[in-house]
Image (tube, helix red, strand yellow):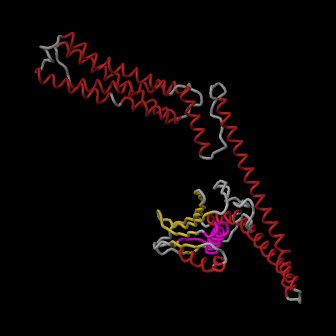
């Protein structure tokens, strides 16, 4: 509070000094004008003091007006002062230019001021017009601009814009800055309610998602224990003397049990990753070598299908940082998905390339079904592209690929181009000597 009072006293003192200087300078100029002469120093003092009077006087008037507005803040005062100063800057070059012109006239006309061209009355009118009338008119325009700029409606619109910016930045818990007397009060209440509703909806969604993950984790764990026992008993039955028919039955049961075990494990891993409890061992991985290794490991699956794998690997550096087990699972899922859902006899193109310091892996295949779904839907859990279920699968392949990739700080995306399905994995290239 003391600082504000001190500033106010300084401004008042400067205002009074500027007024005294202006009066002295104006008196001097009038006295000189009687003898058709003028004083450059007096002109300089007059326009400097006049600018000071304008700035401080207008500033005081509008600061008082600003204080009477609802929901006034100190920041608004500071912004108002800066704006007033900026609006008065054009007066400085105006005065300097007019003074330069008067000096040129003096040099061309001797010590008398354009004595042969204008009369005393004309000179008086010109001086008043240049140094008082035009600046006063400009001051009226400045005041009108400030009144319009800082009108209550403008203030309320700015507050509304600030509320929208806060909401856009994710700050849902906002308060209504308008008083009940202001016309924008109801709009403020609408935005406050909107923020509260959105915040509550997001909290409910996060809670529901957490409950789903916990349910999947618990169910997966509860199913895995008895299933492991079942697989063990099936292995014991296989060792017994069985007829050919019984052997076929047991083999079928074993295959189904193994697939069920894989699905439960996938569910468990997906839930674990989504909850952020996945154990990651980050290390340097070479994308090209990873692809070649997976292709070699899946050689029997590839040969048992009538699909053609075409590799297009970049010669650039393809090292990146990720969890090797997770990335193996990602690439394996994507290749299996491409083989499973590709058109018979078509090619599957697996390519790596570098773009903007990122290593990209793309897997393209021509689908053997109508892809009537959105790109964002296919990466959801349990979503299958093959609605007719003509192929085996549980709808977790792409969901696992996306979740694992993002867990390793990568980016996963899918794209549909007519009948071509494209899965893309992107990682930032590892710099030199990374580990």
Horizontal arrangement in the rendering, residue 8 relative to residue 234 (left or right): left
Q: At x 67% / y 60%, what residue is drawn?
A: 369
Does the magenta segment cover residue 65?
no
Q: Which residue is at 78% across, 66% downward? A: 217
The residue nearer to you, when weighing 309 against 216, is 309
Residue at 78% over, 70% down: 264
Total number of numbered discs in the rendering: 0
Residue sitting nearer the eye, 325 or 137: 325
User: Looking at the picture, does residue 174 appear above or below residue 11?
Assistant: below
Taking 325 as reference, is 208 left or right?
right
34 w.r.t. 287: above or below = above
Residue 128 placed where, x, y %?
28, 16
Task: Determine the residue located farthest toward the front in the rendered image.
Answer: 345
Q: Eyeballing the image, is 406 above or below 61?
A: below
Q: Is residue 52 left or right of residue 209?
A: left
Q: Position of residue 278 (x, y in %)?
A: 69, 69
- Where does residue 319 sit, x and y in percent of width and height? 51, 73
Magenta stretch, residue numbers: 320-345
**Which quadrant of the structure image shows residue 327?**
bottom right
Q: Nearer the viewer, residue 125 or 252?
A: 252
153 or 101: which is nearer to us? 153
As for residue 343 lying within the magenta part, the answer is yes
Residue 53: quarter of image: top left
Give the image location of residue 92, x and y in percent.
31, 29
Mostly what secondary structure, the magenta segment? helix
């Amino acid at each position: 509070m003391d600082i504000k009072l001190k500033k106010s006293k300084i401004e008042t003192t400067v205002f009074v000094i500027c007024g005294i200087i202006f009066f002295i300078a104006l008196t001097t100029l009038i006295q000189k004008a009687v003898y058709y002469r003028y004083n450059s120093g007096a002109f300089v003092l007059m326009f400097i003091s006049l600018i000071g009077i304008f700035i401080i006087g207008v500033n005081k008037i509008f600061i008082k007006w600003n204080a009477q507005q609802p929901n006034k803040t100190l920041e608004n005062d500071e912004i108002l002062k800066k704006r007033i100063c900026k609006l008065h800057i054009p007066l400085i070059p105006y005065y300097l230019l007019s003074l330069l012109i008067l000096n040129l006239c003096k040099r061309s006309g001797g010590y008398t001021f354009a004595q042969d061209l204008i009369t005393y009355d004309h000179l008086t009118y010109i001086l008043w017009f240049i140094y008082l009338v035009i600046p006063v008119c400009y001051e009226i325009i400045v005041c009108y601009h400030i009144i319009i700029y800082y009108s209550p409606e403008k203030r309320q619109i700015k507050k509304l814009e600030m509320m929208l910016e806060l909401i856009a930045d994710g700050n849902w818990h906002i308060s209504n800055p308008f008083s009940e007397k202001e016309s924008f009060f109801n709009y403020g209440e609408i935005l406050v309610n909107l923020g509260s509703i959105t915040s509550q909806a997001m909290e409910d969604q996060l809670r529901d998602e957490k409950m789903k993950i916990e349910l999947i984790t618990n169910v997966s764990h509860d199913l895995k224990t008895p299933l492991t026992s079942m697989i063990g008993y099936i292995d014991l039955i296989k060792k017994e003397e069985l007829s050919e028919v019984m052997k076929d039955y047991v083999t079928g049961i074993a295959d189904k049990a193994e697939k069920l075990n894989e699905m439960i494990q996938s569910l468990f891993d997906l839930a674990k990753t989504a909850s952020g409890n996945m154990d990651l061992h980050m290390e340097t991985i070479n994308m090209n070598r990873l692809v070649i290794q997976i292709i070699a490991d899946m050689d029997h699956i590839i040969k048992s299908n009538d699909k053609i794998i075409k590799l297009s690997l970049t010669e650039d550096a393809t090292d990146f940082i990720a969890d090797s087990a997770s990335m193996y699972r990602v690439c394996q899922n994507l290749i299996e998905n491409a083989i499973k859902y590709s058109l018979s006899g078509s090619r599957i193109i697996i390519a790596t390339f570098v773009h903007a310091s990122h290593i990209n892996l793309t897997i393209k295949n021509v689908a053997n079904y109508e892809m009537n779904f959105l790109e964002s839907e296919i990466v959801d859990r349990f979503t299958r592209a093959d609605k007719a279920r003509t192929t085996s699968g549980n709808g977790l392949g792409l969901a696992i690929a996306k979740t694992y990739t993002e867990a390793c700080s990568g980016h996963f995306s899918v794209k549909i181009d007519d009948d071509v399905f494209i899965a893309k994995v992107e990682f930032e290239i590892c710099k030199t000597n990374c580990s």
